[in-house]
Image: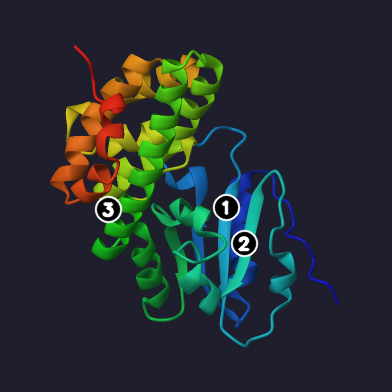
Amino acid sequence: MPALPPAPGDTPAATLAAFVARAAADPAVAGLVLSGSQVHDGMPTVRSDHDLHVVLHDGDASPLRELDRFRSAHLDLVVLTLAEFRRRGLPGDPAAFSRYAYVHARVLLDRLDGEIAAVLDRKRTLDPDEARTATAGYLDAYVNQTYRSLKSYRDGRGAMGHLDAAESVPYALEVLFALHRRVRPYNKYLQWELERQPLGDDRWSAGRLLPVLRRILADGDPRTQRALFGDLAPAARAAGHGEVLDSWGDDLRLLLPRP
């Protein structure tokens, strides 16, 4: 028999409570993890639902498995096995883009004596090797996009330079957060992260960084691009990534801030 969808309550919180009780009564459920705006203080609105991850014991059958990707105005579900949960969001996983969902997630049920919480904690930050690899890769991509952009501006192709400038911003953010062993937040939570958990340097405060990014996205201003590079490059060198920068040779001069 197909699994019945979660019964809607009068409010998202009521719907969540009813489904949590239903899941807790299923012996195949190993854990429940809440993510999304509800775990970011100050972010939920009257339209916010609850994002819930249901972790099943490996090899145990459950009708809840059929509710994977169920979505309603009150509840979004991800249903996965413990083995899938261990891999979810980590390098090599097709859903690696979803890792930030776990950074501030809360455990609602853990039937494995803390193992659900331990797996979740592994996802919250980048380990040193992971951070080093991520920084190097994203730094090279960031330099590449910025170089392409500034070369187009130099050659009188401003519209194309603007497109490359816009594409450089995600790479810049990946570099910035990886340098701090942090998972890059979804754009929705970028300001929240910078204000609630600062990166430790006023250059990366919300008040300074966000206007820079918005200017680059708005028109690709070459001077603003060079200013951002002028801040990011020394931080990358200090973290041991000078080799990535130096591999660009004389081309790097195009990216340097000018008087």
What is the C-alpha distance between the residues marked 1 and 3?
Answer: 25 Å
Between discs 3 and 2, the one toward the N terminus:
2
Residue where numbered disc 2 is placed: 78
Between discs 1 and 3, the one toward the N terminus:
1
Few, some or many residues within 10 Å of mark 1 (<14, 14–19, 20+): many
Residue nearest the observer in this picture, 217 or 122: 217
Q: Quadrant of residue 245?
A: top left
Residue where numbered disc 1 is placed: 51
Say what secondary structure mark 3 lies in. loop
Question: Residue shown at 23%/39% (left/top)?
Answer: 199
What is the C-alpha distance between the residues marked 3 and 2?
Answer: 26 Å
Quadrant position of the N terminus in the picture:
bottom right
Between discs 1 and 2, the one toward the N terminus:
1
Say what secondary structure mark 1 lies in. strand
The colour scheme is rainbow
Few, some or many residues within 10 Å of mark 3 (<14, 14–19, 20+): many
Q: Which mark is residue 181?
A: 3
Residue 193 versus residue 61 in the image, above or below: above
Few, some or many residues within 10 Å of mark 2 (<14, 14–19, 20+): some
Say how many tags the image has. 3
